[in-house]
Image (cartoon, rainbow, N blue to C red):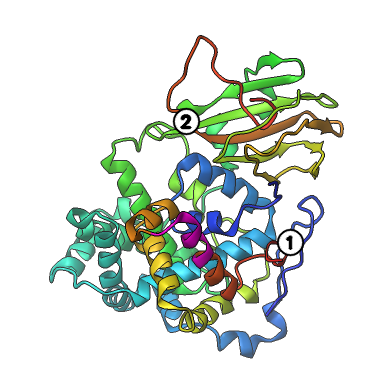
Amino acid sequence: MIAIKRSTHATVKERPVTTLDQKPAKAEGRKDPWGVLLEKVGKHQDRAAYQALFEHFAPQIKYYAISNGIANHAEELVQEVFISIWRRSCLYDWRKAAASTWIFTIARNQRIDMLRKLQRRNAEMAVETEDLWQIPGENEDEPVTSLHRLMSERRIRESLGQLPEEQITVIAKVYMEHKSHQMVADELGIPLGTVKSRVRLALNKLKVILQDQNV
Amino acid sequence: MTRHHPESLTLMEYSAGNLSEPRALCIRLHLEQCPECRGRVDTLDSLGAVMMDQQPKVSVSDTSFEQLMARIDEAPEDTSPVAEAPKVSPLQKLLGQDINDLPWKRQLGDVSVLDITDKFPGQHDRVVLQKLVAGGKAPAHTHKGDETTVILQGAFSDQNGVFNQWDFVSLDEHDEHRPVAVGNEDCITLSVLSAPVKLTGTFTRLLNPFIR
């Protein structure tokens, strides 16, 4: 694990990074199967690879739409997410993000876009969703890759299994139902402070909290 | 309480896509310059992916994939691969000009403000740019809860220390401070506030972080 050292913004512009060139074999071993398929779509418009991705991720995205309260537009969201995957896969770089993380950020942005469209305020805004919520790897100029980033999904999967159910429930409501911490507190009938401390405990375990915020 | 970085809980709401556009803009501007917080958001995005994977799945309609391919074949101009967009700061895109050249309104002494709430239609937050001239002092003031501020240019100092460009500042009603713009540049901040329930009187409240 790469330790995150605190520093001032003015002096440090680089992320904690590791050059992959030094350990090509090891890095190649971290290439996930979905990332391989995404690359095939990006480089060759490979339809079989695209279909395999669709079969795996489309049912997840459909549930994501339903749990986010747009059940009437669930099939439409799946379509929009996959059109976006088709169009953007040429920009996907497996060294910058795991494929499922990349697909999650696309689903999230398409969900935000769809809500904007449903509220009829899409055209009025000068900034687009991608200007505010970045797709990992796009418009990033670092020639090197954060190993920390590649490792994170595997580490999260392992750490998540050790979290108590009550913490996972709160996180699921934030991610899958786009609820604020206050809305989660109201729904579960517990104080806001309890919701926040559950999230903090979970993020601490997942090593998201900066060390200086944790003392 | 004052901080230089957004809280992890706020970053999680950002990663989940639950923040309003102006609050997301504050986070995005900070992330552009802060490798540590970028690393935290990367981890949180992966958390989102793992959550999505561990939730139930719902079958899509039988013709869903065929529809998708038909769309790709029939409207190639709308479904062709995208080129990477040129890198333009979201702030530049939003304002269309340099922040120093905006039609600033002198508010009080060394402080100028510009309300840009109308750039974000259909949401309830109030969005304000503020400028404290280089070397200028803001009058002592306190704050009300639930606001987000990021420093766009220059720096200011108060009794809690120095806040530099791209730092996050969180203040609440317990904080009374008297910021001074340090360095040679005017200090410009972007603040997002929960809109007041009701405005009373002729004068709109003055806004923080410099003045309320």
Amino acid type, residue under disc 2 in the picture:
Ala
- Secondary structure beneath label 2: loop
Horizontal placement of B155 versus B18: left or right? right
Name of the residue lying farthest toward the top: B202
- Rendered position, A8 above or below A23: above
Please tell me in which quadrant of the rendered image residue A176 appears: bottom left
Amino acid type, residue under disc 1 in the picture:
Glu
Horizontal placement of A38 versus B168: left or right? left
- Rendered position, A102 above or below A72: below
The residue drawn where x is 46% and y is 48% is B19
Front residue (pair A66, B196): B196
The residue drawn where x is 35% and y is 58% is A189
Horizontal placement of B123 versus B32: left or right? left
- Rendered position, A9 above or below B171: below
**Horizontal and vertical percent position of residue B138:** 76, 24
Question: Does the image show residue A63?
Answer: yes
Question: Does the image show residue B17?
Answer: no
Q: Mark 2 points at which residue?
A: B195
**Horizontal and vertical percent position of residue A60:** 30, 71
Q: Residue A14 carries which label?
A: 1
Identify the magenta region: A190-198
Q: In which quarter of the image is the C terminus of chain B?
A: top right
Q: Which mark is residue B158?
A: none
Q: Which chain carries label 1?
A: A
